[in-house]
Amino acid sequence: MAVVNDIYLARMVCFNPGVNAQYSINVRSYLCTATLGTGATDAQIAASIEGLVATQFKAAISSFCSWWGCSVQRYRPTLGPTTPAIALRGVGLGSATPCPAQVAGLIKLQTALGGKRGRGRAFVPFPGVGSVSGSGQAIAAYTTSLVNLGTVLVAGFTSGVGGNTNTFQPVLVNRLTFATNLILSASPSFPFSQQRRRSQLRRPDVAPFA
């Protein structure tokens, strides 16, 4: 159960079952801005976030890979248990052959705060080779998928049923002071980026949740 000013972490997970199985985890922060009644359960919050982003992640990843699910965890003021949502688990909608595991799309996130502390980024994993043009650029359909994903990453949402709900807004969190800044916009950045922590040369990852 969340109360106003609680910060929740959402881990958005995609899976590449290739030679060295890789899990991509995008960690996003959400600030609780309103509570009605007893509020939503963590399971409801996780399901709401999965419902918000799963379709857009699927549109951006290879059909060899899959959307694995989303988990949430209260981060502040005290650390809570992790609760997953996997109802929308399923394969991507991109071309069947994925790019090398470290290749990723990139979405830049912006708050009203200037400088590096006011900016964030989201790596979008496992694009299909069909999303790349002959000149190495993203094709129009892939660009659209990142725009659509960015739109939902900056969207607030209300979770719960009846008179028991929470409202959340996406934020960036200062790791030293835990101050939050509302994410105002998201924009794709090209050409493709890479996540060096993810590689076909490293050991297989362990699933963050079943």
Image (cartoon, rainbow, N blue to C red):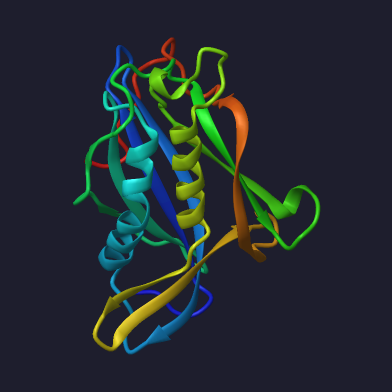
Residue at left 39%, top 46%?
Answer: 12
- Vertical arrangement, residue 163 with respect to residue 86, above or below: below
Q: Quadrant of residue 172?
A: bottom right
Q: Nearer the viewer, residue 177 or 136?
A: 136
Residue at left 50%, top 55%?
Answer: 151
In the image, farthest residue toward the left: 87
In the image, farthest residue toward the right: 115
Q: Is residue 164 left or right of residue 74?
A: left
How many numbered callouts? 0
Q: Is residue 127 left or right of residue 70?
A: right
Q: Quadrant of residue 92?
A: top left
Q: Nearer the viewer, residue 137 or 125?
A: 137
On the image, the x and y values in percent for residue 196 come to 55, 22
- Vertical arrangement, residue 190 with respect to residue 108, above or below: above
On the image, the x and y values in percent for residue 168 come to 46, 71
Res. 82 in view = no
- Vertical arrangement, residue 186 with respect to residue 36, above or below: above
Res. 168 in view = yes
Q: Nearer the viewer, residue 77 or 142?
A: 142
On the image, the x and y values in percent for residue 80 come to 39, 62
Q: Quadrant of the N terminus?
A: bottom left
Q: Quadrant of the C terminus?
A: top left
Residue at left 44%, top 15%?
Answer: 100
Q: Nearer the viewer, residue 150 or 201?
A: 150
Residue at left 50%, top 18%?
Answer: 133
- Vertical arrangement, residue 2 with respect to residue 154, above or below: below
